[in-house]
Amino acid sequence: MSEPDPLDAVRLRSAVRKQRIGRRVVVLEETTSTNDKLAEMAAESAEGLVVLAEHQTSGRGQYGRHWESAARKGLWMSILLRPQLAVAESRRLTAFFATVIAATIEKQLRLVPAIKSPNDVYLDGRKIAGVLVEMRVESRGSYCAIAGLGINVNQTLTDFPTELRETAGSLSLARGSSVDRTELAIELLRRMEERYTAGQL
């Protein structure tokens, strides 16, 4: 498989700049986790901020589990939302993002993913994506949602630790060819925008 290409920040921003989700897009070379970085920026940011990183040193999934984030091989992103939901309803956001991931993969790549409730997406019996939604109290007493998405895009099996090689997968492994990560990110953000603005939570 060819050398991984960097995300095209200019192309990505241009494609989604008129949306609420994607009105501001930050692309980092490396961070601990995109959720942590977005949390630092949330108080001074409008809804729809998106943070992506080429590599996470401390990516995490549900229950604080470590998420392998091979550099320039996946999509590691977080989105800032301020939905009209109670904290107890945050599982609806998790389901929303898992559904968007699955629908985008099916439309763009003609693959048929399955959602393992509440937050994981599988292809051919292998986990290829996960969602982590963290609700935070803001200074004025309202809540914001920090939604982290991790999608394995162009990994080979050797990109995963030995203990994950029987269970982890990627879009390129399922498809048999590499995937344009920038184009996938654009389509994900477009589909999020369409469903979120339509109130499909």
Image (spheres, rainbow, N blue to C red):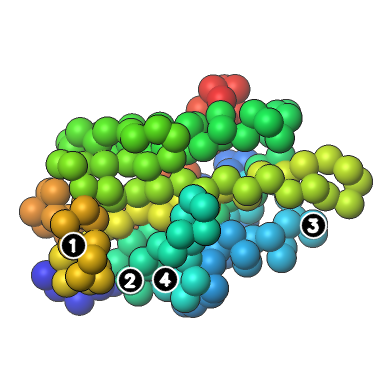
Q: Amino acid at mark 3?
A: Ala
Query: Dot 1: what SS?
Result: loop
- From the image, tell me which residue sits under label 1: 165
- From the image, tell me which residue sits under label 2: 70
Q: Earlier in the sequence, mark 2 or mark 4?
A: 4
Q: Earlier in the sequence, mark 1 or mark 3?
A: 3
Query: Which residue sits at x=20%, y=70%?
Result: 162
Q: Out of 76 and 133, give the one closest to the viewer.
A: 133
Q: Are marks 4 and 3 in contact (CB under 8 Å)?
A: no
As drawn, 183 above or below 201:
below
- From the image, tell me which residue sits under label 4: 54
Mark-to-mark CA distance, 4 and 1: 22 Å
Q: Residues within 10 Å of mark 4 (few under 14, many from 20)?
A: many
As drawn, 188 above or below 26:
above
Mark 2 or 3: in front is 2
Query: Which residue sits at x=36%, y=66%?
Result: 68
Query: Which residue sits at x=91%, y=46%?
Result: 140
| Label number found at residue 124 | none
Q: Residues within 10 Å of mark 1 (few under 14, many from 20)?
A: some
Quarter that holds the N terminus: bottom left
Q: Position of residue 127 (x, y in %)?
A: 27, 48
Residue 61 in sight in this render: yes
Q: Amino acid at mark 4?
A: Glu
Mark 4 or 1: in front is 1
